Amino acid sequence: MTSPDTEPKSLYAKREPIFPRRVKGAFRTLKWWIMAFTLGIYYITPWIRWDRGPSLPDQAVLVDMANRRFFFFMIEIWPHEFYFVAGLLIMAGLGLFLFTSAAGRVWCGYACPQTVWTDLFILVERWVEGDRNARLRLHRSKWTGEKIRKTAMKWSAWLLIAVATGGAWVFYFTDAPTLAVNLVTGQANPIAYITILVLTATTFFFGGFFREQICIYACPWPRIQAAMIDEDTLTINYRHWRGEPRGKLQKGEVAAGQGDCIDCMACVNVCPMGIDIRNGQQMACITCGLCIDACNDVMDRIGKPRDLIGYMALTDEVAEVAGKEPKSVWKHVFRPRTIMYTTLWSGVGIALVVALFMRSPIDLNVTPVRNPTFVTLSDGSIRNTYEFRILNKHGEARDYHISLSSDAALRISLEGTDELKVTVPANEQKSQKVYVVAEPGSEAALADRTDLRFWVEDIGATDRVHHDTIFNGKAN
């Protein structure tokens, strides 16, 4: 027979739900403000209007998938300008590296969508069920009418938030007021309903049930952040030299050799990740600062100095143990690594701004027709054909004059018209065949290749663009 001690044991431990206790303090207040700000941006932005003229959408921020355009207030991004989006993604990545290098996982602790929505769901949970001890008792109790009522109220509120979250997302991809009416009347595209359903489900379960598990097991950033952190990075740490040996609050001679930590577990009870910061830095720590607020509150009540738990770097802890003055915050923030990230981030941003203001309202693409390379006409002249694609980025139709410049004598004409003018509708691209002819026996007709430059000029404005290409002669 197998003894109980030798029986195989499961390596899987059932998850114990975490019920963070309410806490007040500077970091908790900062988290409330950031949550209100970020949620406000997310839910309100699709409803902001922006007048762009009669032929363009009046939604300030819109990802127009049908017409392959992105609108951001006065800025309009076309498909061929995707480098702007790529640049913004690069800036976001560099910004994440910068903040992590300077102050640890502050993104995770304050602005990550998982953190923000989890905070909101915990707030609802606290309103319905009470603070930590009440929620623990309710969780461990048997299913009664009271427990069913409170759980139903909590889940209903979570579901409303989840639906609003999924609904707000789809409003970014089409006119929000129109889509809202279509959603209510059942006339919206099935993709809209499917998207809302998927985002509702993920928000409901991620924010309500999975919570810290998403950060620990699903998100890759906790495993990557170590490469961004060094001994000068400001992270949340427990001052062992000051807090140990910990023990219950004592007075008189009994407390002479005791540290400042009274083992009240306040820092653990407020932690949304359920960790004990006194055990040192851990992968699960999202650097939210709630343990600092909780510990400072306890220190104030027992008459001990604050910041037993606080933001500090490894070098600070070494200096404090040695009785030396730690570095200032600014010396931690401004150091070679963060300066490098800031320089790169600023460089990409400046390049995007310059490119944005230097871009032309006309986009021209010229493709020489290669089959055949040239045509010999009945009078012996040589003709090349070019496919023009002119993009009008204005909100109204524009007339464009097409011309060429070259050292050789070449004639230009347009297919379907005797004029050298083409009209392009507002915010559309138009294709136009252009013919270039060299007279019989001319240098361009007999040569291999002749350089030429096409010009497209907005007749109603001063904007014009050019495209350099070649003319193929008989020797080609």
Image (cartoon, helix red, strand yellow):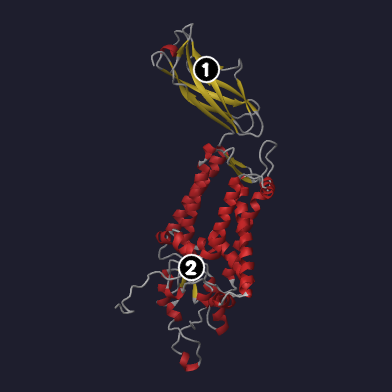
Say which amino acid is labelled 1. Tyr
Q: Is residue 44 above or below residue 231?
A: above
Q: Is residue 409 visible?
A: no
Of circles 1 and 2, the one toward us is 1
Front position in the image: 220 or 201:
201
Q: Which residue is at the far bottom?
A: 253
Say which amino acid is labelled 2. Ser
Q: Which residue is at the far top?
A: 379
- Counting from the top left corner in percent of width and height, residue 455 is at 55, 24
- Counting from the top left corner in percent of width and height, residue 236 is at 48, 70
Disc 1 secondary structure class:
strand
Left of 168 or right of it: where is 266? left
- Counting from the top left corner in percent of width and height, residue 428 is at 60, 32
Q: Is residue 70 visible?
A: yes
Disc 2 secondary structure class:
loop
Residue under the image location 54 percent in, 61 percent down: 205
Q: Of label 1 and label 2, which has the lower sequence position?
A: 2
Q: Which residue has dot 1 on it?
A: 435
Alpha carbon separation for disc pair 1 and 2: 70 Å
Q: Is residue 430 above or below residue 334?
A: above
Left of 291 or right of it: where is 419? right
Report the quarter where the C terminus lies: top left
Q: Is residue 135 above or below residue 438?
A: below
